[in-house]
Amino acid sequence: MTDATPHQTPAEPDQADAPRSDDKQGSAPKKRMNPRARFILRALLVVVLVIVAAWVLYYQFRGKYLESTNDAFVQADSVTVSSKVSGYVDQVLVADNQIVKAGQPLVRIDARDYSAQAAQAKAQIDAAAASEEAANAQLAEQQAAIAQAKAQLAAADEDARFATAEVERYTPLAASGAETRERLTTLHNQQAQARSTVAARRAALDAAQLRVRSLQAQVRQAQAQGETAKAQYDAASVNLGYTEIRASVDGRIGDKQVRVGQFVSPGTRMMTVVPTRFYVSANFKETQIGIMRIGQPAIIKVDALPGVEFHGHVESLSPGTGAQFSLLPPQNATGNFTKIVQRVPVRVAIDATPEETRAFVAGLSVTVEVNTIAAKDELRDLRERSSEANATRKEPQ
């Protein structure tokens, strides 16, 4: 019994000492932050605040006026090359992706049929010219015949006047018996014959003059036939020229489908000439074009050329959204209408030379950013007018 008590007594002081040790550790003073670390932390906080303030200022004075979209593509006004006449392709003078100049021959169609048509029309022109020349010669002859008829009529008139004068002179002599009645009768007969000759000559002159009108009509008819033949010749010459198809613009050949020996009809698509002058078609949201105006500067980034920026400017804005010009425009007058942000096509000109854009290909994806800050005053004035109008409507009557 006496041994148990001294065995338990040493354990009590150990249990009592444990809390004291914990109390000493809890009441020990905390170590203060290093002044250098405190300075770095405060400096970082100041830098963050400056960056945030700078970003807010930048956004308020410039950033909110920068409208960008990645729904944009490189475009070119491609020209579809097709035939205006039918025939078999005789030669294809260009290869795929070849660079061509305006006026350069691309395709030749067999021109023999059209050459024959042009020759036939030319022969008709010559025939009409010969007919006109013959009619003019006859007309000249008839003019001479008219002059002769006029001379003969003048002579007959002179004879008739002489015969009349003789009758008038011999009539009183025959009445007085100085001349015989037979002489007077003969003179009356000569007078009648002279008058008949005058009538005949005048009729011949009228006939000759009418013949002139007929010949003049023949000349006009020959001229009309010549003009018709010339029109046919011009049409045949045009068709003959269409057998050689030339490039209408500078560009590169794409989508070439024509082959030698192929029969083509008018309108048959042969190839496409893609101009080397490109532009960007950017589809901006309707919430982005409020103060977008023609001439505003733009920055263009092409996905195919990372790290390269091109400058441009807004060239034009579409008069309608893309949905309005689609094949089947949406009809929103229904009960299940869901509002969707519309897109407006904007044409952006690229302010770069063809050498700088030689890597461009129609259809490339780009990102466009337009700076609309130049029109901020318009937006402010519009808001002020709207506020004034609202205040006027709210005033009591």
Image (spheres, rainbow, N blue to C red):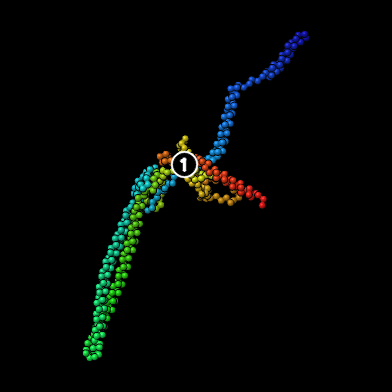
Label 1 SS: strand
Residue 139 image position (x, y, % from top left): 28, 68
Quarter of the N terminus within the rendering: top right
Q: How many marks?
A: 1
Residue type indicated by callout 1: Gly
Q: Residues within 10 Å of mark 1 (few under 14, many from 20)?
A: many
Q: Is residue 74 visible?
A: no
Q: Residue at x 24, y 85 (%)?
A: 169
**Residue 353 versus residue 177 in the image, above or below:** above
Residue with the mark numbered 1 = 312
Please identify the quarter of the rendering in which residue 155 is found.
bottom left
Please tell me which residue lies in front, 255 or 206: 206
Side (left or right) of 105 relative to 288: left
Please identify the quarter of the rendering in which residue 120 is found.
bottom left
Side (left or right) of 310 relative to 182: right
Side (left or right) of 47 relative to 359: right
Farthest-out residue, bottom: 177
Q: Is residue 178 visible?
A: yes
Q: Residue at x 57, y 50 (%)?
A: 332
Residue 105 image position (x, y, % from top left): 35, 47
Residue 205 image position (x, y, % from top left): 28, 74
Farthest-out residue, right: 1
Please tell me which residue lies in front, 197 or 376: 376
**Residue 90 versus residue 15 in the image, above or below:** below
Side (left or right) of 289 relative to 271: right
Residue 113 image position (x, y, % from top left): 33, 55
Q: Residue at x 25, y 88 (%)?
A: 172
